[in-house]
Image (cartoon, coloured by chain):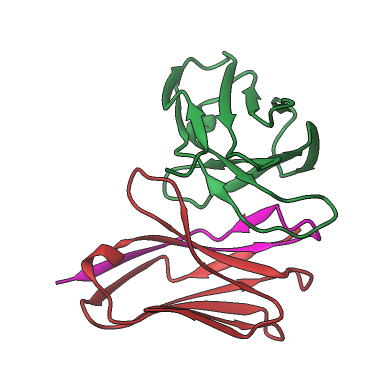
Chain colours: A red, B green
Amino acid sequence: GENVEQHPSTLSVQEGDSAVIKCTYSDSASNYFPWYKQELGKRPQLIIDIRSNVGEKKDQRIAVTLNKTAKHFSLHITETQPEDSAVYFCAASVDSSASKIIFGSGTRLSIRP
Amino acid sequence: ETGVTQSPTHLIKTRGQQVTLRCSSQSGHNTVSWYQQALGQGPQFIFQYYREEENGRGNFPPRFSGLQFPNYSSELNVNALELDDSALYLCASSPGTVQKARYGYTFGSGTRLTVV
């Protein structure tokens, strides 16, 4: 089955700097790649997603890139702010219904003031 | 508010007991998925229900079972609880269908289960 690897597990950046989180997936049939942000004690919330027919997508300070050939995708956060501190999960969908989503192990992002 | 509600929010059970967790999906969503999130880990897919039938299952033993009702609400049942079952259990609803790719996932706040 699908396996999603995520790196790094922890990341600390200075406020205002950029943060990059990288993921790889194993199943070449995966066609949907969402990113979730989970604050302490709260539910995961979708922050951005990308589909396999697109190489890059941007939403304000957040961008995702997808390299289908290499089977990896990345999350980029620019001009980081204290409220960006959270755990971020990448994920990939594995079947045509695209409703079963496999998550990475998470990256704990800390923003230093 | 996302519209996906789970109950109870917290639960403490003894090893060997049985537990039922409940989820009310967001209006218009006919697909419900259940995930187990251990402390410090990513959510692990347990199973998914679409129109009252199981539609995919992750690597969990048969003592994890579920139901979906005509109003698309759902239950997760776990028998013979083990200490390792302690985790946050998340329900996610989506408007997905089997034939069509629909991607919107809305998570509930979860039920934190502690097995002692």
Could you tell me which residue is drawn at 78 percent across and 31 percent down?
B52
Front-lying residue, B25 or A100: B25
How many marks are shown on the rendered structure? 0
Q: For the view shown, which residue lies furthest in the left direction?
A: A113
Could you tell me which residue is drawn at 54 percent across and 31 percent down?
B85
Image coordinates of residue A39 in percent, x first then y, are: 34, 52
Image coordinates of residue B106 in percent, x first then y, are: 55, 48
Horizontal side of A87 relative to B64 (left or right) equals left
Q: In which quarter of the image is residue A19?
A: bottom left
Q: For the view shown, which residue lies furthest in the right direction?
A: B99
Q: In which quarter of the image is the N terminus of chain B?
A: top left
Q: For the view shown, which residue lies furthest in the front direction?
A: B28
Which segment did they paint magenta? A89-113
Image coordinates of residue B32 in percent, x first then y, are: 66, 40
Could you tell me which residue is drawn at 81 percent across and 60 percent down?
A96
Image coordinates of residue A36 in percent, x first then y, are: 48, 60
Q: Is residue A103 magenta?
A: yes
Could you tell me which residue is drawn at 72 percent across and 51 percent down?
B96
Q: Is residue A24 above or below residue B100?
A: below
Q: In which quarter of the image is residue B74?
A: top right
Q: Quadrant of the C terminus of chain B?
A: top left
Q: Is residue B70 magenta?
A: no
Q: Is residue B24 above or below residue A80?
A: above
